[in-house]
Structure formats: structure tokens, C-alpha cells
Amino acid sequence: MVQHNIDFRIYYEDTDAGGVVYHARYLALAERARTEAIRAQGQAASDLLADYGLAFVVRHATIDYRAPLRLDDIVRITTRLTELGAASCRLLQDFHRVDGEGGTACGSLDVRLACIRAEDGRAARFPPLWRDLLRELVA
């Protein structure tokens, strides 16, 4: 079982006027974490497009906010695969503030990604190499 962890610092651009991370920034941070999780398995997300003419798109996302992230916090995002279909996958991404007490759970994102052909937007099966790569993130 492999899961991917990556840390990001929260910058002013990520926050609202009160210094709390703006809700939509969780989606951007999660996107970066997914991209790096794939890269850590040996491929860049851009390789899927370059080699196969395929791309990932978000089909559905649900965010559960638990505690605020604030300016200058370090957030650790853990990404793991929970389902893998022929042309879609589901990932769970947990957000924890890195602090001296082992981390504070700040939220989670349940996201379903679809694999599509870039030229026409139609669903397409994951190539075997990519199915194997995604399986490495199984929770």
C-alpha cells in the first residue's frame, strides 16, 4: 500500500481578508498534490496527454472542511486511491496542518477523476501503464 504525502506552505494569495484559506484554494492545493503523487510514481500528468492524447478531468468533488488553515501554516496533503475503474478513479485527499502535536485534521476531498480523449472529450480507458501507476496509490 502506498499513499503520497506532500507539504505546502499557505501564502497570502491562498487566504481571504481574515487570513483563513479561501475555500476554493483547497481544490488548487489538491490538484497540485495529485500531480505530484503521479509524478512520484514515475510519470508526469503531461505524459498521458503527450503519449496517448488522454487527460484527467474532475468529474465530481466533495470537500469536508473541519478546521481552518491560515496564513503561514504548513499543510500536509495525503493522496490515496480508493477506487479504480476502466476510465475513472476516485481519490481521497486529506489536509492536515503540520504542527507540534502530530497534525490537525483540517479537511478532506473526495474526488472522482475521469480519463478522456483530449480531442473530443469522450471517455477513454486508462492505458495499462497508467492503470498500474494508479494502483500504486491504493489505500
Image (cartoon, grey):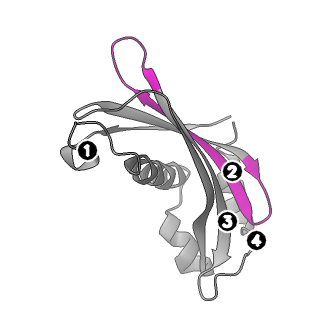
**In front: label 4 or label 1:** 1
**In front: label 4 or label 2:** 2
Q: Which residues are magenta?
A: 83-105
Residue holding disc 4: 125
- The amino acid sitting under disc 3 is Ala
- Sequence-wise first label, 4 or 2: 2
Mark 4–mark 1 Cα distance, whole angstroms, equals: 40 Å
Q: Is residue 94 visible?
A: no
State if disc 3 and disc 4 touch (CB < 8 Å): no
Residue holding disc 1: 16
**In front: label 1 or label 3:** 1
**In front: label 2 or label 1:** 1
* Numbered disc 4: secondary structure: loop
* Numbered disc 2: secondary structure: strand
Residue holding disc 2: 90
Q: Quadrant of the C terminus?
A: top right
Find residue 103 and report its horizontal and vertical position in percent: 42, 19
